[in-house]
Amino acid sequence: MELTPVEIDRVIEMAWEDRTPFEAITYQFAMAEKDVIALMRKELKQSSFKLWRARVNSGVSNKHLMKRNAEISRFRCTRQRTISGNKISKR
């Protein structure tokens, strides 16, 4: 599946968000975790990619639903602007 530049930006944004699990990216873009990692490796600078991987693998990120606290039931912060149909309202 070929992604448009706007979709690539959205996947990268979702990957950086701590509360957005890989399963949400898979649901919206049909990309497995390994595909997201490959995209991030390709699109980010090497230093940014290393920072992202360190954050995902640390205890700070909730990127994996299995590691996530059961009390968290949403993908985004309550203060974040609404997102509808993969279109970001702030753009």
Image (cartoon, grey):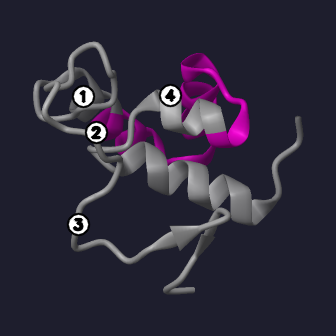
**Sequence-first disc among 3 and 4:** 4
On residue 51, the disc is 2
**Sequence-first disc among 3 and 1:** 1
Q: Residue at x 50, y 28 (%)?
A: 23
Crowd rating for badge 2 (residues with CA inside 10 Å; few <14, some 14–19, many 20+): few
Q: Are discs 4 and 1 less than 8 Å apart at CB? A: no
* Amino acid at the residue labelled 1: Ala
Image quarter of the N terminus: top right
**Sequence-first disc among 4 and 2:** 4
Q: Residue at x 34, y 50 (%)?
A: 17
The region drawn magenta spans 28-52
Q: Which residue is mark 3?
A: 78
Nearest to the eye among marks 3 and 4: give it. Answer: 3
Question: Which quadrant of the structure image shows residue 41?
Answer: top right
Q: Which residue is mark 4?
A: 23
* Amino acid at the residue labelled 3: Thr
Residue furthest right in the image: 2
Q: Tell me if residue 36 comes above or below residue 33 in the rendering.
A: below
Picture coordinates of residue 9, whole percent (x, y): 61, 60
Residue 32 in magenta? yes
Crowd rating for badge 1 (residues with CA inside 10 Å; few <14, some 14–19, many 20+): few
Crowd rating for badge 3 (residues with CA inside 10 Å; few <14, some 14–19, many 20+): few
Q: Are discs 2 and 1 less than 8 Å apart at CB? A: yes
SS assignment at label 1: helix
SS assignment at label 2: helix
Q: CA distance from mark 2 to mark 3?
A: 25 Å
Q: Which residue is mark 1?
A: 54
